[in-house]
Amino acid sequence: MLTLDRAKELLKTTTTEDHLFLHANNVSVAMGGMAKHFGEDEQYWMAIGQLHDYDYEQYPEEHLQHTEKELIAQGVTAEEVRAILSHGYGHCNDVEPLTNLEKSLFTVDELTGIIQAAARMRPMGITDMEISSFMKKFKDKKFAAKCDREVIRKGCDMLGMDVREVAEICINAMKEYADELHIGPKTDI
């Protein structure tokens, strides 16, 4: 079973850019929140989230095309690789998310980008973010415009949940890691 430490080790073999590590951490933490919601293994879901963009830095135009063979060779199971591949459904591949883990990864990958951007605009970061203020940002298509809201909605539909519910789970999980995710209160130095 993939561990969070092993996922971090593997990601370091293909990734050097800080913003990609930050994104991996955001998705990892959100996945932990989703696991908790579904009564699943938080550390395992976090590991999948941590490793989801394994080949992105090296192959941004061929994202997820260089993941399966390499990760299988590193001892990651076919089931774990499938979960990672499923977040590219419809835009990188045709691996449809089937399990709650896969559907969650598909959804939170884009969602965490909007949460991160919204939190960075606030003096207290994510620490005092309410779902109502997040939803205003979510509805503003010009805000964090690169984050695909249709993918988020599609993922929420797959989960049988609404955006507000999934966002609240992710925000609450991310609050616990605010400093590590660089979305804690702003301080004057």
Image (cartoon, helix red, strand yellow):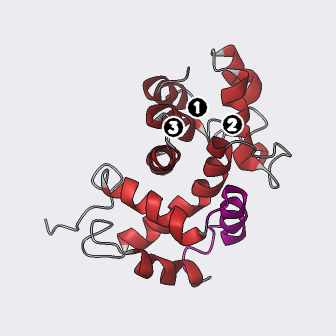
Disc nearer the start of the sequence (3/2): 3
**Which stretch did the figure color magenta?**
142-161
Q: Nearer the viewer, mark 3 or mark 2?
A: 3
Residue 156 at what x, y percent from top left? 65, 62
Q: Quadrant of residue 128?
A: bottom left
Q: Which residue is mark 2?
A: 83
Three-letter code for the amino acid on which mark 2 is drawn? Ala
Q: Quadrant of residue 85?
A: top right
Check if mark 3's residue and mark 2's residue have beta carbons within 8 Å.
no
Mark 2 neighbour density, 10 Å: few (under 14) some (14–19) many (20 or more):
many
Q: Is residue 5 left or right of residue 69?
A: left
User: Which residue is rendered at x = 55% and y = 77% of the image?
Assistant: 138
In the rendered view, tell whether residue 100 sits above or below residue 149.
Answer: above
Residue 58 at what x, y percent from top left? 66, 38
Q: Is residue 86 left or right of residue 167?
A: right
Q: Nearer the viewer, mark 2 or mark 1?
A: 2
Q: Nearer the viewer, residue 178 or 128?
A: 128
Spatial CA span between label 1 and label 3: 28 Å
Count of marks, rendered view = 3
Question: Label 3's element?
Answer: loop
Q: Which residue is mark 3?
A: 40
Identify the mark at residue 14; answer none if there is no mark.
Answer: 1
Q: Nearer the viewer, mark 1 or mark 3?
A: 3
Three-letter code for the amino acid on which mark 1 is drawn? Thr
**Quadrant showing the N terminus:** top right
In the rendered view, tell whether residue 51 sits above or below residue 70.
Answer: below
Residue 172 shown in magenta: no
Q: Quadrant of residue 83?
A: top right
Three-letter code for the amino acid on which mark 3 is drawn? Glu
Disc nearer the start of the sequence (1/3): 1
User: Which residue is rendered at x = 52% and y = 66% of the image?
Assistant: 165
